[in-house]
């Protein structure tokens, strides 16, 4: 994570244009494993107790460490970001960086006091599934869990069809089900559903390969909320 410095001598427009540009900006950066946190704030130091101008990457990382992998750092019900007393760039008041894939902070006004993450965005290339940091965190945890389980199958005895050399259905299910159960129990409401598939088409006797594919159906995130409010006359409502 990178805290981009916004100089006090620089205008908001010039600063945002520079960040979104080619050099020294991030226009040509396309990597779903990189994230740029833009802006500074007045941040409380947990060591000295002093409030100083610091990169917002500091409180952003603190928020990530305090939530589950599938929870958005921008989830307002988690409360405002602690330790931040002022922003030098408020994306809610001066938009432009969120659309350029930067992670920013914002306010929501008097009804929701405090400072919040706008969205935890990755510097992803076009077409990538990993727009938001929580998506990458979920998959990373899934990979660690799956890898740990599959280590127990190195040089394991795999029952195969006596005619084709391909894994028996019963054996494939015995591998898939425990991994599904593990991912469901540990990832919990951070995902919708895990799917695990052992390739039944491989001749294991010939290749020595056990091929396992894991897919995660993610949860959805209410990035935008639309509401409709009006007056109703119950006498005119259709039954």
Image (spheres, rainbow, N blue to C red):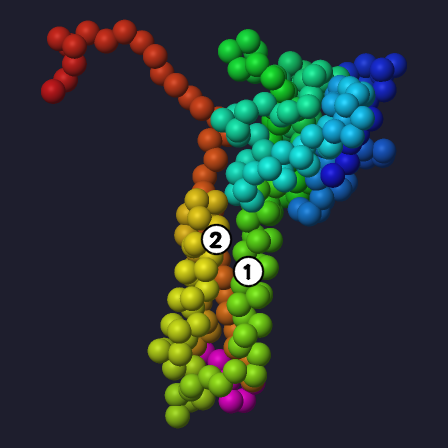
- For numbered disc 2, what is the local secondary structure? helix
Q: Quadrant of residue 130?
A: top right
Q: Are marks 2 and 1 in contact (CB under 8 Å)?
A: yes
Asked if residue 44 shows in the view, the reply is yes
Q: Residue furthest bottom?
A: 162
For mark 2, does the 10 Å Cα neighbourhood hold few (<14), some (14 to 19), or many (20 or more) residues? few
Quarter of the image with the C terminus is: top left
Res 21 visible: no
Residue 227 horizontal side relative to residue 237, left or right: right
- For the point 53% across and 38% down, the residue is 71
Q: Which residue is mark 2?
A: 186
**Residue designated by label 1:** 145
Toward the viewer: 31 or 217? Answer: 217
Q: Is residue 43 above or below residue 178?
A: above
Q: Position of residue 98 (x, y in %)?
A: 65, 28
Q: Residue at x 81, y 33 (%)?
A: 25
Q: Secondary structure at mark 1?
A: helix
Residue furthest to the front in view is 48
Outermost residue on the right side: it is 9
Q: Position of residue 174 (x, y in %)?
A: 40, 73
- Give the residue displayed 58% in from the left and 59% down from the top: 143
Question: Measured from the top left, where is residue 64 in percent x and y?
Answer: 62, 38
Q: Quadrant of residue 194?
A: bottom left
In magenta, the rendered stretch is 201-207
Measured as percent of width and height from the top left, residue 32 is found at 66, 46
């Amino acid at each position: 994570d990178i805290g981009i410095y916004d100089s006090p001598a620089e205008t908001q427009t010039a600063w945002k244009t520079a960040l979104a540009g080619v050099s020294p900006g991030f226009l040509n950066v396309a990597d779903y494993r990189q994230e740029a946190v833009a802006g500074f704030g007045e941040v409380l130091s947990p060591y000295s107790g002093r409030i100083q101008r610091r990169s917002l990457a500091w409180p952003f990382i603190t928020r990530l460490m305090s939530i589950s992998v599938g929870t958005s750092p921008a989830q307002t019900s988690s409360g405002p970001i602690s330790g931040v007393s002022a922003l030098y760039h408020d994306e809610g008041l001066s938009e432009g960086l969120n659309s350029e894939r930067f992670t920013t902070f914002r306010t929501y006004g008097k009804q929701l006091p405090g400072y919040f993450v706008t969205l935890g965005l990755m510097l992803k290339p076009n077409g990538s599934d990993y727009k938001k940091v929580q998506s990458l965190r979920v998959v990373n945890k899934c990979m660690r869990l799956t890898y740990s389980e599959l280590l127990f199958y190195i040089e394991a005895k795999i029952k195969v069809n006596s005619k084709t050399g391909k894994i028996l259905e019963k054996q494939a299910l015995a591998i898939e089900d425990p991994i599904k159960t593990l991912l469901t129990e540990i990832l919990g409401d951070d995902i919708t559903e895990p799917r695990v598939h052992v390739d039944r088409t491989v001749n294991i006797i010939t290749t020595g390969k056990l091929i396992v594919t894991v897919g995660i159906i993610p949860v959805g995130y209410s990035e935008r909320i639309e509401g409709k409010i009006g007056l109703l006359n119950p006498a005119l409502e259709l039954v």
